[in-house]
């Protein structure tokens, strides 16, 4: 059964939903591991989409920090030639250090020159059945919106994550 958190009002998924989510995440990780060796040769491989999950809220406030201790940086790029997408928008949302989703851990920012972005945040708390992760959406004119997730091993203070979008045909 899904459970509504009494303080935050956020819904937490029940064990079955979490299990299904974990299985899907594992599949994504296996696929990602299998393509890791070829990634360098295919720098403009589109970023694989991943589940949105139940905690997305549109129009998160523009800001560069939703906490401290973990810095995420990268570039927003487009296929086929890896061109940078300055002016594109990146949104992120994640659990707090206790593993609960809250509005304090939602943010948006506009990619700068060369498509670069950087935000600092708290290390996402683990909730049952999932590896630590940050949810990300990215938008750029002329490109398909992307919903994906950045997975962490645990203990990182920095992570690099280029986001590669596909043009609308
Ligand atoms: Fe999540």
Image (cartoon, rainbow, N blue to C red):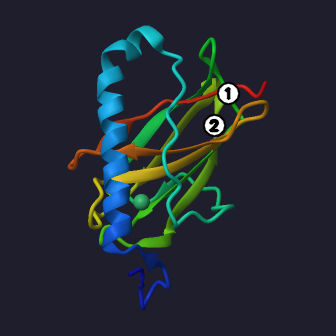
Question: Can you say whether 19 is above or below 117 in the image?
Answer: below
Question: For the point 32% across and 38% down, which residue is it?
Answer: 29
Q: Quadrant of ligand 1?
A: bottom left
Q: Could you tell me which secondary element the residue under label 1 belongs to?
A: loop
Q: Could you tell me which secondary element the residue under label 2 belongs to?
A: loop
Q: Position of residue 6 (x, y in %)?
A: 42, 91
Foreground of the two, 147 or 113: 147
Q: Say how many tags the image has.
A: 2
Question: For the point 69% across and 61% down, which residue is it?
Answer: 59
Q: Where's the C terminus, which quadrant?
A: top right
Q: Position of residue 68 (x, y in %)?
A: 36, 57
Question: Can you say whether 71 is above or below 104 in the image?
Answer: above
Q: Residue furthest left?
A: 155
Q: Examine the rendering and report whether any part of residue 69 can be seen.
A: no
Question: Can you say whether 157 is above or below 169 in the image?
Answer: below
Q: Position of residue 99 (x, y in %)?
A: 32, 69
Give the residue pinned by disc 1: 85
Q: In the rendering, which numbered label is found on residue 146?
A: none
Question: For the point 29% across and 67% down, which residue is it?
Answer: 127
Question: Can you say whether 79 is above or below 20 in the image?
Answer: above
Give the residue pinned by disc 2: 111
Q: Where's the N terminus, which quadrant?
A: bottom left
Q: Say which label, 1 or 2, has the lower sequence index.
A: 1
Q: Position of residue 130 (x, y in %)?
A: 30, 57
Foreground of the two, 132 or 70: 132
Say if mark 1 contacts mark 2, CB within 8 Å.
Answer: yes
């Amino acid at each position: 059964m899904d459970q509504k958190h009494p303080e935050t009002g956020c819904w937490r998924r029940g064990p079955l939903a979490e299990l299904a989510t974990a299985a899907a995440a594992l599949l994504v990780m296996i696929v990602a591991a299998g393509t890791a060796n070829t990634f360098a040769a295919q720098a403009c491989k589109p970023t694989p989409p991943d589940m949105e999950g139940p905690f997305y809220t549109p129009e998160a406030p523009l800001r560069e920090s939703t906490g401290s201790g973990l810095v995420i940086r990268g570039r927003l790029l487009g296929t086929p030639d890896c061109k940078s997408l300055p002016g594109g928008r990146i949104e992120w949302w994640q659990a707090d250090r206790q593993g609960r989703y809250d509005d304090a851990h939602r943010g948006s920012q506009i990619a700068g020159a060369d498509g670069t972005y950087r935000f600092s945040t708290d290390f996402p708390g683990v909730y049952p059945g999932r590896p630590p992760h940050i949810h990300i959406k990215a938008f750029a004119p002329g490109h398909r919106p992307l919903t994906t997730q950045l997975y962490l091993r645990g203990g990182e203070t920095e992570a690099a994550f280029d986001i590669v979008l596909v043009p609308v045909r």
